[in-house]
Amino acid sequence: MIKENLEKIRATLPKSVTLVAVSKTKPVSDLQEAYDAGQRIFGENHALEMRDKHEVLPADIQWHFIGHLQTNKIKYIIPFVTLIHSIDSANLLEAVNKEAKKHDRVVDCLLQFHIAMEETKFGLDMEEAQQLLESDEFKQMQNVRICGVMGMATFTDDEAEVRKEFKHLKKIFDTLKVKYFTDQSQFKEISMGMSDDYPIAVEEGATLVRVGSKIFGARNYNV
Ligand SMILES: *Cc1c(COP(=O)(O)O)cnc(C)c1O
C-alpha cells in the first residue's frame, strides 16, 4: 500500500518539487517500507521520536523536522537533522545555532510563517521575520543557514482560502529573497502543502510538500 501511495503521489509532482514523507506516529516498519520503495526524506514532529527512528533506520535517510521544536529538545536532533522546517522565533534559531556549533555543523533551516486563520498554528509574521533577519544576533550566527520558508494553511474545505494563504507564503518568500537573500542560492525552498492540499500548494510554487496520511494512512494518536 505504502509503495503504491508513494508512486501515485510522485507521479503527480513536477520534478522541481520534493516529497517529504511525514511519518510521525508511524512505526519503523512503515518507514522501512517507504524506504524500500525509494523514499529517502522523512518528516517528523517530535524530537525524541525522530532520534529513535534515526537510530534504527538506514543512515542515508534525510530527516526533516517539521513540528514545533522546544529548545530543550534541540540537542536530540542536531547531530543528524537535514532540515528544520519550523523556526518560529529568533530564540529558537539562536538555540539551534548554539547547539549546531557544539557539533561543528551548519544546520539548514526554514522560517515558519503563520499564514492560517487559526490562532493555534505557530509561526512568524513578516515584521518578526524582518526583525530577526536584521538583528546583530542573526548576523553572528555561523551555524545555521536559512534556506526558505514554511507554512501551514487553514484546515478547511474552502480551496480559495487555502490558495490565498499559499499565495501569501509565496509572496513572503519573494519579498525576503529580494531583500535579504538575492545572492544566496540556498534560499530557494517553499515548504507548503499536506495530504489534502498539496496539489494547490504545488500550483502556487511549493518546492517541498509534506505528505503523511496520503502515504501511510490515517494516524491514530491513541496508540
Ligand atoms: C502532520 C503534518 C503534516 C502531514 O499531514 P497529512 O495531512 O497527514 O499529510 C505536514 N506538515 C506538518 C507540519 C505536520 O505536522
Image (cartoon, helix red, strand yellow):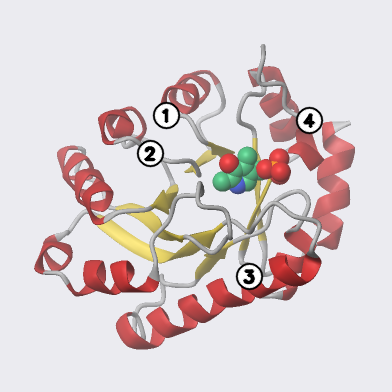
- Crowding at dot 4, Cα within 10 Å, few <14 / some 14-19 / many 20+, comes out as few
Q: What element carries label 2?
A: loop
Residue 175 vs 80, above or below: the answer is below
Q: Name the residue under label 1.
A: 47
Position of the N terminus by quadrant:
top right
Distance between the alpha carbons at the discs numbered 4 and 2: 23 Å
Instruction: Determine if the C-beta at disc 4 is less than 8 A from ligand 1.
Output: yes
- Residue extending farthest to the top is 223
Image location of residue 155, percent across then percent down = 69, 51
Residue 41 visible in the current orientation: no
Mark 2, mark 1: which one is toward the viewer? 2
- The image quadrant that residue 13 belongs to is bottom right
Q: Name the residue under label 2.
A: 69
Image location of residue 160, percent across then percent down = 77, 72
Label annotation for residue 166? 3
Q: Which of 101 and 202 is in front in this view?
A: 202
